[in-house]
Image (spheres, rainbow, N blue to C red):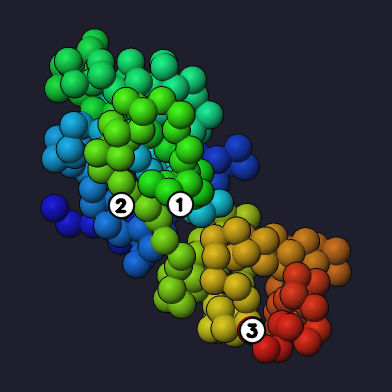
Amino acid sequence: MGVPSQIALPLSARGAAQRIVVGVANAAVIEALQAPERWPFHVAVLTGPKRSGKSLLAHWAQAMHGDILEVIDDAQGMDETALFHRWNAVQKGGTREGGALLLVADADAGADGWRIALPDLASRIGGSLQLEIGAPDDLMAGELILAQAEARGLSLPEGAADYLVPRTTRSFAAIEALVAAIDRISLERQTPATMSVWRAALEALHGPEQQRLL
């Protein structure tokens, strides 16, 4: 089954269509989310860095599969006994014939980071399919910058991503913060988001020396 080049999601509160950029960091996750019938025990655990779109991807998958897929967000914070029963219910079919369960957890809640006190639950979570969103590469980082700008209604001139990617941290949260800073400074100065605004945003986030070295 092929992976889409981008994923459209429902309208955001600002009225702009949200989308998930597909790249090296999440392509395998997206492909797996399209086929829950292949998951071991019909359960998958989705983890990833902050602002990487875990919850959005989970809701996209749920919309795709309808009532057969149950999503539990912030699964690491759920009562362990209740989660144990939920896992077992999926094995028995529960109220969803042929159903599957997707657990969404923080990045540090993976195999080594999710400290589960209940031994039976720990073994079941460990045996489930582990899906992890990684860090974006340069190509994906550039697409993320453009997607974040699009979501904000921010117009970036051609070449913005090529300039910004080598000068900022390659993480979902850092890229979101950078585009937010560009948007804010552009509005404060009442000028288009050109290179002088990019530089000011980089300096605000990284400092004058660090932003030149990144």
Query: Along the polypeptide, which appears first: circle 3 or circle 2?
Result: 2
Horizontal relation, residue 133 to residue 16: left or right: left
Q: Position of residue 164 (x, y in %)?
A: 61, 79
Q: Residue at x 24, y 39 (%)?
A: 127
Q: Are marks 2 and 1 in contact (CB under 8 Å)?
A: yes
Q: Residue at x 37, y 52 (%)?
A: 132
Q: Position of residue 107 (x, y in %)?
A: 49, 49
Query: Along the polypeptide, which appears first: circle 1 or circle 3?
Result: 1
Label 1 – label 3 distance at C-alpha? 23 Å
Horizontal relation, residue 82 to residue 62: left or right: right
Q: Residue at x 74, y 64 (%)?
A: 181
Task: Name the residue tied to disc 1.
Answer: 48
Label 2 – label 1 distance at C-alpha? 10 Å
Identify the element where label 3 is drawn.
Answer: loop
The amino acid at mark 2 is Val
Label 3 – label 2 distance at C-alpha? 29 Å
